[in-house]
Image (spheres, coloured by chain):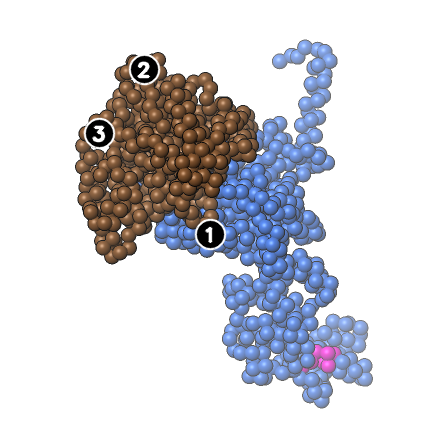
Chain colours: A brown, B blue
Amino acid sequence: MINATVSALSASLAAKELSSVELASLFLDRIAAAQPALNAFVTLDPEKTLAQAKAADKRRARGEAGPLTGIPIAHKDIWCAAGWRTTCGSRMLANFVSPYDAYVLERLGAAGAVNLGKCNMDEFAMGSSSETSYFGPVRNPWHPDCVPGGSSGGSAAAVAARLAPGATGTDTGGSIRQPAALCGVSGLKPTYGVVSRYGMVAFASSLDQGGPLGKSAADLALLLNGMAGFDARDSTSLDRPTEDYTRLLHSPLESGSGPKPLAGLRIGLPKQYFGEGLMPDVAAAVEAALGELKRLGAVTVEVDLPTSDLAVPAYYVIAPAEASSNLSRFDGVRYGHRAQDYGDLIDMYCRTRAEGFGAEVKRRILIGTYVLSHGYYDAYYLRAQKIRRLIAEDFARAFERCDVVAGPTSPTVAFKIGAKTADPVQMYLNDIYTIPANLAGLPGLSIPCGFGRGAGSEPSGGTGRLPVGLQFVGDYFSEAKMLGIAHQYQLATDWHLRAPQELKA
Amino acid sequence: MPMPAGPGRALLRVFVPSLRRGFKSMKWETVIGLETHAQLSTRSKIFSGAATAFGAAPNSQASAVDIALPGVLPVLNKGAVERALRFGIAIGASINRKSVFARKNYFYPDLPKGYQISQYELPIVQGGAIRIVTKHGEKTVRLTRAHLEEDAGKSLHEDFHGMSGIDLNRAGTPLLEIVSEPDMRGAEEAVAYARTLHALVRWIDICDGNMQEGSFRCDANVSIRPQGETTLGTRCEIKNLNSFRFLERAIEYEVRRQIEVIQEGGRIVQETRLYDPDRDETRSMRSKEEAHDYRYFPDPDLLPLVVSEPWIDAVKAALPELPEAKRERFQRDWGLSAHDAAMLTQSREMAAYFEDVVSVGAEPKTAANWVMGELSAALNRDDLDIVASPVSSRALAALLARVRDNTISGKIAKEVFDAMWAGEGEADAVIGKRGLEQITDAGAIERLVDVVLAANPKSVEEFRAGKARAFNALVGQVMKASKGKANPAAVNELLKRKLGAR
């Protein structure tokens, strides 16, 4: 049951083999048991969850159930959910109860999905390890000493540990894909504008994009069907006809057939994604996955993304710049944390923000404030925007030669908790392969493709086998096709079915 | 202290006093540019659906977007853009087909997001001009730009036990900030510009112009320079002037202050100043050094604002005839003076009233005199808007028709007007009821003239002796005897004949 896909669970619910309440209870029990070890959740409210499950059962009894009705979904604690505490992993919002639903919550709620709880995350989504949370670090279900990646680490860990059939996340520089890779699950960052940002606590508005995490590409397609859609309350939401993201799962390419479902698929391999810093085990797993894709009919072509090396620096100008402004609203005046003792207004601001924000958030506010300052704007922000355009042009050129770009999601497997906290730059380099898709607004997908061991610095064997992620970056609005390619890969392989050791029993 | 001899000393002695004397006798030119915030008359806010109505209970018109809850996003109000377009077209500006909303970052309790959304590098309206009329004639004031932005909330500093209250009803109210070039040369021109602009935004129905409620407020950039100098002096910005009188007095004070500072050998420091109407002076608020670094950058939550050609055309087609065009037409077609034309186009309602009076046959100059004279005086006296006038345009036209056809004299017409104003009915009814119809019957007037001549032999004698004033006295006596109803022309005529005949 815990390993069942969303569509299998949906079928069981439809066949009345189990009720939504039973399903939700099962996962709530698993969460409660795993919470001390993993810390994947920030807020649980079994009463609310079960009430929603009950409502889903009633709805089914009325014959109004859809594919997501009664399916429990864990939500990254960045999404506002009416009546739920929405902390964004920060002390600043530790007691903030949202009076409204984010579009994604509203939409999934309308589909009958059940809110299983709010997942732990890096504070304000700033991090690649889920260690910056005010509520303590999340642990990787594959090894308790390792990080799950971030910032959607709680969501990825929850899916990996089978605490939820699916989860929502957000991805600003890799925050869905990298934790998905490090936890051995599938994660999709859609094209910018496909999932409304209304009700998502903003980190970097021009890069933030919500998306699903799940055990398989097929599940991601079902979940994205429940999350995507035009929302007039988000000016950057794209007004496009509704898409069924499951439609290309079985035949992603017209040219494919039989044992060669991917015949005609050209996979672009950017040389920049296979260079220095890439852990050998990760490279090997990705090479093997590419071999499998070729067996399924795909061909590989080398592509050039020459601006890739500027992606991380440009990102660490643009994202902090937007964040420094987005986080100004947390001032202690209207809601959220306010310092207990203060002198004048300025003192209130200073103490409130000094107490309410963690070190990484402060670091990024400082960077962002600096790069937007008078006299520095042109040198930093404007140049970063130019680089951003060059990166998008790189991809546009690449997509003239290939249908999808592939490579590793992250240069390494999961690292030990605390290993990179002292060196922000090393931490930032985790997202070297994921950031370009955010800067270009392109869809990115990570699926499990093997295992690897820690690098030399890791005690050999100490962390055992850890998951490796394969990343696809597609052209705008190619989500359905990418999910189809991934689904074909997952039909031919079983990496996505592997669960952490202790769960096998 | 004795100074060492030498060329330096001599130079110093000569230079300083002469410079001082120079400043004292120097003629100064005042240079003024205005930044005006006009609140746009949309029903909902610029980036949220909350109402903009004035005077609601605190925070009752503040939505999730207005109080900046986590996760909320702005959505641009099309009505605000449409009003900006109307303004841009009305002043002959160029409309930027693509403009950009930026964030102006600063912390203040009444600024919920910690930034104000405003247009910075690319405003929607660029250029344009406004013609103003002062007693020295007409003048063109060029506009730099007009951009859309949101208003902040209000901090209430009293009655909260040592704390401040925040009312966010005003937060997110749409504003058009209209920036002029430094083209005005004194308080009079600045006020004329502000009044013309005020009339225009109401004329094109983009702003209610209510200055008490803060719907229309000005910041004045004031500097002085020696007459003939072409480079600008250092300016001071006077903030938040919400009446024409304060604008005038603040500028006058500021100019005096700046001249004094320079004459005393000082230097003007660029700063923001606040006008205190109670003490009638401006006070320093913050210097340029203390000015914020607002860290402007394009708001990533809003796409660039793109205005299509058809939209501009539609807005243009729907604009009413503008005051300038009307002024010219009144002068050209109806022979009104520039002054009268300007007076009658102070508001669209006044112009419409006047045109309505003329359209039913009143002579334009007479109609103009009545609208600007009796009617305006009565409206002012009773503090009424012209649309609420107890005497309608048609009723006034009917009254003027009775003057024209000699039923009553102009003087009696004023009495009739007052009666109409008091609600006694239409002109004809009042004339009938009060028996005010003019006496035009020559026989009746002749009888009155005879009686008056017989009763005033002294005046008759004086007239014969060459005193013209005596004639007027006699006319007055006849009019009095007729209770003002005798036709003055006929009285004149008959008197002249009778006196000549004797």
Q: Is-magenta flag for residue B488?
A: yes
Q: What residue lies at 68% left-to-right and 24% top-to-bottom?
A: B17
Q: Which mark is residue B213?
A: 1
Pointers 3 and 2 in contact (C-beta within 8 Å): no
Query: Mark 2 or 1, which is nearer the eye?
Result: 2
Front in this rendered view, residue B82 or A349: B82
Task: State the image coordinates of residue A6 (x, y, percent, origin top left).
Answer: 29, 42
Spatial separation of the CA atoms under disc 3 and disc 1: 70 Å
Front in this rendered view, residue B128 or A496: A496
Front in this rendered view, residue B123 or B393: B123
User: Do pointers 3 and 1 mark residues of a single chain?
Assistant: no
State the quadrant of the C terminus of chain A. top left
Q: Count residues near mark 2 (Cα–Cα under 10 Å), then give few for <14, some for 14-19, many for 20+.
A: few
Amino acid of disc 1? Glu
Q: Count residues near mark 1 (Cα–Cα under 10 Å), then give few for <14, some for 14-19, many for 20+.
A: few
Residue sticking out furthest to the bottom = B443
Task: Tell me the chief SS of the magenta region.
Answer: helix
Q: Count residues near mark 3 (Cα–Cα under 10 Å), then give few for <14, some for 14-19, many for 20+.
A: few
Please tell me in which quadrant of the rendered image residue A433 appears: top left
Residues rendered magenta in the picture: B486-492
Q: What residue lies at 55% left-to-right and 57% top-to-bottom?
A: B205
Image-based side of B456 in relation to B253, left or right? right
Task: State the image coordinates of residue B327 (x, y, percent, origin top left).
Answer: 68, 60
Amino acid of disc 3? Lys
Does residue A102 appear in the picture of this structure?
A: no
Query: Which residue corresponds to mark 3?
Result: A504
Does residue B353 appear in the picture of this structure?
A: yes
